[in-house]
Amino acid sequence: MSSFSLTNDSLLGILNIIKFLFSITILLVGILLSENAALTDCDRFFYKPLIWFGVFLLLVSLTGFIGACFYDHLPRMLWVYHVLMFLLIVAGIIFTIFAFAVTNKGGGRLLPGAGYKVYRLGDYSNWLQNRVNNNRNWNKIKTCLVESKVCSDLYSKYLDVSFNKFHQKPLNPIQTGCCKPPNGCGFTYVNPTRWVEEIWQVYCENPDCKAWDNDQNILCYNCESCKAGVLDNIKHSWKKVRWFYVICQMLLIIMYAVGCFAFRNMLTDES
């Protein structure tokens, strides 16, 4: 009987060592994704849930390992571990469903003859819209956009390019929405980040046309098209994370089920 109990102790210990290594992998993936985010520093905070998930899993796996190794002295530790593990899995499933829901809507629309897409804020989920419509959040993102020199790089890259050639360049969502005025405004092209406004454009109904400014610190950073470009960037970033979450959840559920089986055998043997 003691041999059987020891086997279950060992199984739980091994499972938690695997979870510990797994949590370190999740942490490294979260950190690497945030460091290589497509919008540099500006969308790194969207990877925080993945990093916190890894930290919590690391702590839970340590709890399970200690409980398995010192079960005779800390019998309640394994109960705590299984409750925390269950809550972690439930929270992970809820977040995964949420990530699929909020990133399911939205996307760019192709323009005839253009090499880039245009983006509308209203095409994205209400939750994402609320994040960028919050002045506090947007001011942080806007400051980051200016400091990351996204539009300055666009200016340097296509400075001597004519309008027709510029119109055919594969601009990314941030460059399309934040570094140039919307196409419907009818501004006259001078260079990628400088456009001349015509007199008749004061009657333009699109608020983004009035928000445009040739000041390199303003440009179209206050435009809805810029917010839409940021959301499209975030959407594609989250698509990477959400599938990683699905794989993590499947592995954790399998390990949790095996751990529960071993723990039940320990309790049966003890009784």
Image: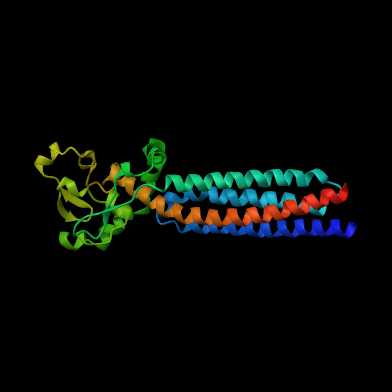
Tell me residue 168's x, y (percent). 21, 62
- From the viewer's perspective, is 193 left or right of 236? left
Foreground residue among 6 and 149: 6
Q: Is residue 236 visible?
A: yes
Residue lying at 79% horizontally and 59% vertically, measured from the top left: 10
Tell me the quadrant of the picture where the N terminus can be found: bottom right
The percent coordinates of residue 74 (x first, y second) are: 83, 46
Please identify the residue farthest to the left as the structure is shown: 200
- Residue 242 image point, x, y percent: 49, 53
Q: Is residue 254 left or right of residue 138?
A: right
Position of 167 relative to 211 (above/below):
below
Closest to the observer, 114 or 141: 114
* Residue at 56% across, 51% down: 51
Residue 27 appears in the picture as rendered:
no
- Scheme of colours in the image: rainbow
Q: Quadrant of residue 24?
A: bottom right
Q: Residue furthest right?
A: 1
Q: How many marks?
A: 0
Q: Residue at x 51, y 59 (%)?
A: 32
Q: Position of residue 179 (x, y in %)?
A: 27, 51
Residue nearest the viewer, comparing 186 with 108? 108
